[in-house]
Amino acid sequence: MSDLAPYPLAALARRMLREFDAQQSIFDLPARKFVLGDPRRDLSVRFHGHSAATPFGPAAGPHTQLAQNIVLSWLAGGRVMELKTVQINDRLTIPRPCIDMQTLGYNVEWSQELTLEESLEEYVKAAMLIRILDASGRLALAPGFGRTVFDMSVGYDLAGIRSERVQAFIHGMMNATPVVERLRRELPAELGPLRDLDFPARLSDTLTLSTFHGCPPEEIEAMVGHLMREHGLACIVKLNPTLLGAAEVRRLLHNALGYAELRVPDGAFEKDTTWEQAAAFMDRLDGAARSLGLGLGVKFSNTLIVENHRSFFPASERVMYLSGPPLHVLAIHLVQRLRRNFGDRFPVSFSAGIERANFPDAVALGLVPVTVCTDLLKTGGYVRAAGYFEELARRMDAVGATTVEEFIVRAYGEGGPADLTAAKLRNTDLYVERATRDPRYQAASHHKVPRKIGRTLKLFDCLTCDKCIPVCPNDANFSFRMLSTPEVPVSEARQIANFADFCNDCGNCDVFCPEDGGPYILKPRLFVNRERWLRDAPRDAILVERDAITGRFDGVVVRVGAMVGDDPRAQILRRLREALLDPGEVNYVGEFLRGEAAG
């Protein structure tokens, strides 16, 4: 089984608040790494008529698919949430593993893994959880720091967007009242007044259009026109790095940055929109947007299609999609090209190789939002975002800036233009030159791979380094306490397990685990739904129910209820269930079963 399964809102809310009260963390993110704002600095930005408390957010991808992912991004300071792209074809078969962050960033997954209806519900749940968290009084948010914008994303052709189900998704995002009221009734009584909050019903009125490689320019223009005219949506058009043209992409990748092994297929340039075509339809769409009183922007950049030269993905995958450091340089060159053609006419959303060191530069260029994916999939996960804000604060303090606009004007030294637009254009030219020469983006800086120690994981006991927990984009891996007993001796007081409903076998935890075999494969894989556990056969997996626990080991099924025999596997299951359901533990298994008992 490698498909995701949404989790009940009531159990999510219960876990979120219980975990904070008991452990000062939420969904395994320590409270000391929450980004709660600083009254000394106003990081707010405008995004298509809305105010967002920061320019930071998660990119459409694995971090914006499940409700808990979005809450984690919000706790990490994200205030423009670019939700994962949805499309009419919502029953995709995605190769596994699908995310490779060993050196740069590659993936072979490019759309939602939930149905359209499930995606809508996850986004509503996320908005409700954020509202609950904000209203609970548990967070010391700086004044105004809660202002958040949800930006939906759809693709990939006009026929799909016009389909009844995608239309229903868009309408649901613009008026989620029926979903909100249904979910409100599911919230547990223990939340008290929090159940009666004024939860947002209009989740979004902005949309980032994601187009697949090879989408004809006239199709892109027709999709944006439809979304503006029929739905009244402010739109951002996500464009591909192939807009730079074959010669410039290859010059940057191979000559300037030294990535000789990265090969972009000729067909990518032959099929993709050219710069001239994109400039022409953006000019026409701008006129339409102005006549409708709507915003129109550009997003740089989509991932870059490259030939699969690695052994990580299944051999059937002939191409993969590049992200991370080299994409940063390509995308920043596109920002420069856009601004040299159009000035500051179009707001620019940005996502390409953002990390701690360059986040302030992206802010200094006036990019909104500055979104992140690849860096959050590395060691530390969402914890890394706190460093972005620390670095931005340091840079702002160094030039005496207390607002984003002041920082844009002052970021690259005195004597520059005081006009905001002129500063954006100047900063872009200065930064493109600097980034293209910066060693951090060059191939020589990205050969080191995560350390392995030559030992294979077992069901229990490992280094317990916890690296597998934050690098999981879905928060599927977790730790729990388990005492050693004569029947089930363990060496470590804390063990690692995998909540299978949130695991899509992406493989990222295996990349960063020092031991071999993959936590998502060899650690206890836990289900709370019998049907999903049965469908997962013949893989080893464990079903935890209110009154029993059942394990499948090498095809043999062992069930433990009230009585436990001498079978060592039964003893393991009993001890595991006791550990997971200990009243002092907070995890997805325990909260789900407590919710069932309460219901």
Image (cartoon, helix red, strand yellow):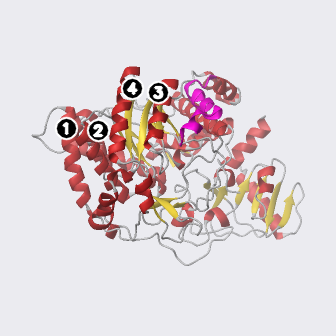
Horizontally, is 461 left or right of 257 in the view?
A: right
Residue 201 lies in the magenta stretch: no
**Mark 1 surroundings: few (<14), some (14-19) or many (≥20) residues within 10 A:** many
Residue 174 lies in the magenta stretch: yes
Q: Earlier in the sequence, mark 4 or mark 3?
A: 3
Q: Main secondary structure of the magenta part?
A: helix
Could you tell me how far apart the alpha carbons at marks 4 and 3 are, in whole angstroms?
8 Å
Mark closer to the observer (1, 4): 4
The residue at which mark 2 appears reads as 366
Report the disc number at residue 329: none
Report the disc number at residue 423: 1
Could you tell me how far apart the alpha carbons at marks 2 and 3 are, in whole angstroms?
24 Å
The residue at which mark 4 appears reads as 288
Question: Which region shows up in magenta?
Answer: 156-177
* Disc 2 and disc 3 in contact, CB within 8 angstroms: no
* Disc 2 and disc 1 in contact, CB within 8 angstroms: yes
Q: Residue at x 60, y 28 (%)?
A: 172
Could you tell me how far apart the alpha carbons at marks 4 and 2 are, in whole angstroms?
24 Å
Report the disc number at residue 228: 3
Going by the picture, which residue comes out furthest to the left? 415
Q: Residue at x 18, y 36 (%)?
A: 422
* Disc 4 and disc 3 in contact, CB within 8 angstroms: yes
Q: Amino acid at mark 4?
A: Ala
